[in-house]
Image (cartoon, rainbow, N blue to C red):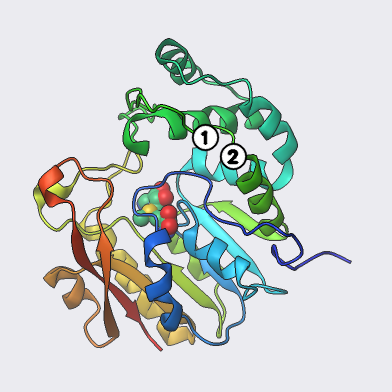
């Protein structure tokens, strides 16, 4: 019989293995009372670094459930698929990388076709690039400079193996967020962590993909949220604490959580800010 334990069988705790802008690792304790106590399937349509998925898996709440993780970043989805199906080949390939400037730019210039090589290249760039940023130019080519870290953990074997175990029987899809409507059924739990609506124009410091996520995308997302609500799904969404977001989700329960901004180009904007968690339950 298929093992649907999603990581409860291993001894290692699954956790994010990439540096990801907007990663929810620091918010997990504040999210704890906000999850629904019971649900059917779990969907995470902006999976990114997957902090919430790994946390739910580690705490046994996904055992035996259908789990669908998706994102519209093709390199990221390839990484998850390779960790799921070929983690040992990936680990072997990661071990060849070196944290050296010229080597970094040589690897950055490559365009490998093999999925394992592609995943290995992107994990290497993610661990050694400037600030762990993920930025691509208009042609979709990764363009972040070398990060000059002393001793980055390019191959975090333990985290990769734990993620591999947690990802067994998980559906991993390259898909825009709207497609969750094709899959979600009444009683399912959907957690949305979209690129945030900017607090102001200068805080538009990251670009996750070639396409920016603008106010129109936020509106389309709010429409998907309302449709899932009508359908009887349990829906939770993170975003920035701005008047625009409060207006979009008027009528739903909105809680504030405290976050510290780790990736920010302006040192004076570091520190604690509030974010919102919107729920329909
Ligand atoms: C804020 S990050 C998610 C952070 C993640 N929850 C974590 O803990 O690391 C947003 C993600 O949305 C993805 N994304 C951006 N636009 C999208 C779209 N239209 N459809 C699906 N995913 C999208 C990006 O590739 C990125 O991984």
The residue pinned by badge 2 equals 156
Report the number of discs: 2
> Alpha-carbon neighbours of circle 1 within 10 Å: few (<14), some, or many (≥20)?
few
Q: Residue at x 59, y 46 (%)?
A: 80
Note whether residue 186 is visible.
yes
SS class, disc 1: loop
SS under mark 2: loop
Residue 153's disc number = 1
**Which residue is at a point 54% across and 74% down the rendered structure image?**
184
**Where does residue 112 sit, x and y in percent of width and height?**
57, 21
Can residue 133 be seen? no
Q: Do residues under tags 2 and 1 come within 8 Å of each other at their CB atoms?
A: yes
Left or right of residue 58, residue 111 in this image: left
* Position above or below: 23 against 139: below
Ligand 1 closer than 8 Å to label 2 CB = no
- Mark 2, Cα crowd under 10 Å, few <14 / some 14-19 / many 20+, is some
- Residue 263 screen position, x and y as percent: 27, 46
- Residue 35, percent from left and from top: 47, 80
Q: Quadrant of the N terminus?
A: bottom right
* Left or right of residue 89, residue 205 in this image: left
Depth check: 220 or 6 in front?
6
Cα gap from disc 2 to disc 1, whole angstroms = 6 Å
Please determine whether, in this image, residue 173 is positioned above or below residue 114.
Answer: below
């Amino acid at each position: 019989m298929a093992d649907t334990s999603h990581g409860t069988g291993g001894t290692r705790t699954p956790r994010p293995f990439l540096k990801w802008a907007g990663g929810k690792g620091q918010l997990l304790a504040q999210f704890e009372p906000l999850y629904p106590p019971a649900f059917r399937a779990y969907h995470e349509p902006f999976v990114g670094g997957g902090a919430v998925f790994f946390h739910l898996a580690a705490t046994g709440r996904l055992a035996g459930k259908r789990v669908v993780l998706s994102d519209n970043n093709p390199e990221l989805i390839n990484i998850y698929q390779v960790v799921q199906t070929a983690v040992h080949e990936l680990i072997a390939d990661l071990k060849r990388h070196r944290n050296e400037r010229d080597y970094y730019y040589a690897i950055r210039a490559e365009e490998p076709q093999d999925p394992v090589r592609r995943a290995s290249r992107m994990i290497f760039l993610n661990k050694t690039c400037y600030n762990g940023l993920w930025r691509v130019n208009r042609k979709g080519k990764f363009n972040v400079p070398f990060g000059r870290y002393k001793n980055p953990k390019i191959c975090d074997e333990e985290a990769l193996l734990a993620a591999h175990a947690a990802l067994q029987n998980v559906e991993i899809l390259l898909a825009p967020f709207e497609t969750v409507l094709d899959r979600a059924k009444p009683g399912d739990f959907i957690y949305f962590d979209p690129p945030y609506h900017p607090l102001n124009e200068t805080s538009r410091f990251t670009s996750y993909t070639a396409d920016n996520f603008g106010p129109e995308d936020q509106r389309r997302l709010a429409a998907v949220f309302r449709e899932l609500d009508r359908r009887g799904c349990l829906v939770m969404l993170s975003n920035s604490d701005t008047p625009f977001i409060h207006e979009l989700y008027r009528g739903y329960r909105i809680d504030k959580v405290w976050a510290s901004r780790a990736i920010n180009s302006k040192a004076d904007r570091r520190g604690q800010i509030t974010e919102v968690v919107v729920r329909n339950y």
